[in-house]
Amino acid sequence: MSAWTRKDLLGIQELSAEEITTILDAAAAFKQVGAREIKKVPSLRGKTLVNFFVEPSTRTRTSFELAAFRLSADVVNISATTSSLTKGETLKDTAKNLEALHADIIVLRHSSAGAAKFLAERLDASIINAGDGAHEHPTQALLDTFTIREKKGRIAGLHVAIIGDILFSRVARSNIHALLKLGARVTLVGPSTLVPRVFEQMGVQVTHRIDEILADVDVVNLLRIQHERQRKEYFPSLGEYTSLFGLTKERAARLKPDALIMHPGPINRGVEIDSEIADSARSVILDQVTNGLAVRMAVLYLCAGAQPAHV
Ligand code: CP
């Protein structure tokens, strides 16, 4: 494995394919650690991690906390409502105060694109981007590519469809960067208002007809509609969205038998995905969540300064 020299993980866009593979390989080693009777390793003993989530989260926040516990770090969780952000303190001042309390790693989820980069440029602590607005969600893309590699044995040459609200999705952007760097072919699917053709400049294909691609893809990754980021209506109704773009039972039956069905969560059952399909044998949605723990252990371990070969 090659060396990792970054103190921060801000996005997938700036990573090389080699760096992405370094994280995925370290995650594979940590997944094996998770299968042992004693799941804890001392790698981050004496380090303090602050989970600073200014937006809601179930999967990301919990798995970063568990990952830090498994690495023997001390963990503190703070949220927007319990922090002094509510009293007008700036993000920079809050983070500087956390650093003054000897935070070594800050995991930040924020509604503003660039918030993690802003802190990384001003603090000595490692900053891990846990989602910044509609910009990037790098650990989600890493756990998604880890899951595809684990299930399919490779990424290169696979055809991955990302279906749904691409315009407002940090998950889509991070996945596009990761999949293209690792040699996959990517098709974006959704209404033209949420999947404009300008995305083709990233090196992906765009279609507004889901039925055109179902028989050809190896992976479908379904995204929910990000109502919280939309300032206007982008399609007439949820019912119409489901009829045109939802993974219904009929559409799932037209996928290749070994196609993977993925979703980063949270799922809106019956909207972007049929409820029974979400729970079916081809769905790897909960495997993605499980793999998020190993991937986040790898990210914390590497950004804290450990070398990949010592996992
Ligand atoms: N996929 C994801 O980021 O989920 P949470 O918002 O629950 O962290």
Image (cartoon, helix red, strand yellow):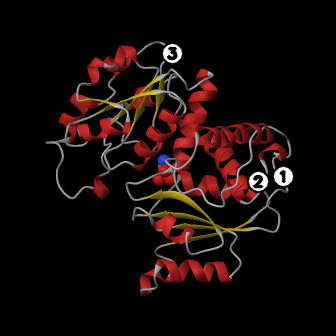
Amino acid type, residue under disc 1 in the picture: Val
Camera-nearest residue between 36 and 181: 181
In the picture as drawn, the residue positioned furthest to the left comes out as: 236
Residue at image point 62% right, 52% down: 63
User: Going from the N terminus, do you reach mark 2 or mark 1 first?
Assistant: 1
Give the side of residue 139 with respect to residue 46, left or right: left
Q: Please, what secondary structure does the residue beneath circle 2 have? A: helix
Residue at image point 37% right, 20% down: 252
Amino acid type, residue under disc 3 in the picture: Asp
Q: Quadrant of the N terminus?
A: top right
How far apart marks 3 and 2 lie (CA) works out to 33 Å
Residue at image point 32% right, 25% down: 248
Camera-nearest residue between 56 and 145: 145
Q: Please, what secondary structure does the residue beneath circle 3 have? A: loop
Q: Which residue is mark 1?
A: 41
**Is 59 above or below relative to 220?**
below
Q: Which residue is mark 3?
A: 258
Residue 40 position, x and y percent, is 82, 51
Amino acid type, residue under disc 2 in the picture: Arg
Look at the image and tell me whether residue 271 can be seen: no
Q: Quadrant of the C terminus?
A: top right
Residue 2 position, x and y percent, is 74, 42
**Is 308 above or below relative to 64?**
above
How far apart marks 2 and 1 lie (CA) works out to 6 Å
Residue 77 position, x and y percent, is 61, 69
Q: Which residue is mark 2?
A: 70
Badge 2 density bin: few <14, some 14–19, many ≥20, Cα 10 Å:
many
Residue 31 position, x and y percent, is 73, 39
